Amino acid sequence: MRQMRGIRLVLAGAALTASSCTPAMVNQQSEEQTIRAISSDWQRAIVAKDVEKIVSIHAADAVVMFSNSPQATGSAAIRAAYAGLVNIPGISLMWTPTKIDVVSPTVATDFGSYTLAYDGPQGRVSDSGNYTTIWHKVDGQWRVAVDAPVTATPMPAAGAAPQVMDLADMQSSSGAAVTWGDFTSPGFDPGAKIAVLHGNPGAKGDYTVRLQFPDGYKIPVHWHPNGEHATVLSGTLGLAMGNTADWKAVRDYSSGDFLYLPAHHSHFGIARGVTMVQLHGEGPLEIKLGAGM
């Protein structure tokens, strides 16, 4: 009897161990359909220039790697990258998943092909390529964790003149048509807004953006790898150069005042009243907290 009892205990233990090792079931078809629906929403958001919708489809720490562009990591960088992309004249971007594989209840992979077209200085520019996307389920919702489109366009032959990938010669935007989004960057308090007027601040090339700060907003000590050209459009911007925030050193700049902030030189500031500043420079626009040169 004792031997039989021991055998039963061993079998029961083996059954428990086997059940604990059984992977969670995944409804491949249902989860794949959900991801395809989100992918379609993503494409519609690009057509609508709804940058906030695009950002919401990505995880907070997502990584986007566009061809020929610096890696964009986190919501702020992805917002800046897409704000530039959707405002390219005549932009058309579409993709088709080839295969979506839900490898676990919280991870899926997606690869396929894309087509891209926009209006360039010499006419319509077209591109095509492939992409790989990794999806993570965050709080019950599928979100993009990594997105890596890769162009299939051949490199120009040695000695050939490179194609200029820039916007049309003439671009204009009325003040009423400017689209504002939340500006978020590590170390910066919430409350600031950003609008991209020209180019892609997250990529190489010239860009123009506007920043709006609420009254009393403090800009922490930071620096940029590239120089910055700043014009105060409204309100008053208090700004000083230095590796530590000495607020007694701040000088006020009013509407119409221009500042050039050299690369690698730390600066900090404060908004006195609701303040709008326009920045332009050579991208990518990177923000580095703390002391520079």
Image: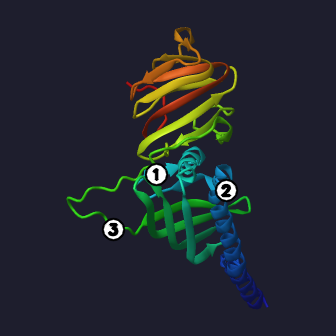
Left or right, 71 with respect to 252, comes to left
Viewer-proximal residue, 18 or 260?
Answer: 260
**At 44% from the left edge and 66% from the top edge, which residue is drawn?**
127
Q: Earlier in the sequence, mark 3 or mark 1?
A: 1
Reading the image, the residue beneath label 1 is 71
Viewer-proximal residue, 55 or 17?
Answer: 55
Q: Which mark is residue 154?
A: 3
Q: Earlier in the sequence, mark 3 or mark 2?
A: 2
Q: CA distance from mark 3 to mark 2?
A: 30 Å
Residue furthest to the left in view is: 159
Looking at the picture, which amino acid does disc 2 mark? Answer: Ala
Viewer-proximal residue, 27 or 68?
Answer: 68
Location of residue 64 with respect to 1 vertically, above or below: above
Q: Residue 34's spot in the image, x, y percent?
A: 71, 71
**At 59% from the left edge and 24% from the top edge, which residue is drawn?**
233
Q: Secondary structure at mark 3?
A: loop
Looking at the picture, which amino acid does disc 1 mark? Answer: Gln
Count neighbours of disc 2 (C-alpha within 10 A) and say few if under 14, some if 14 to 19, many if 20 or more: few
**At 64% from the left edge and 50% from the top edge, which residue is drawn?**
51
Give the foreground label among 3 and 1: 3
Q: CA distance from mark 1 to mark 2?
A: 24 Å
Q: Residue 235's spot in the image, x, y percent?
A: 64, 19
Reading the image, the residue beneath label 2 is 48
Q: CA distance from mark 3 to mark 1?
A: 21 Å
Q: Residue 153's spot in the image, x, y percent?
A: 37, 67
Q: Secondary structure at mark 1?
A: loop
Left or right, 191 with respect to 281, comes to right
Give the foreground label among 3 and 2: 2
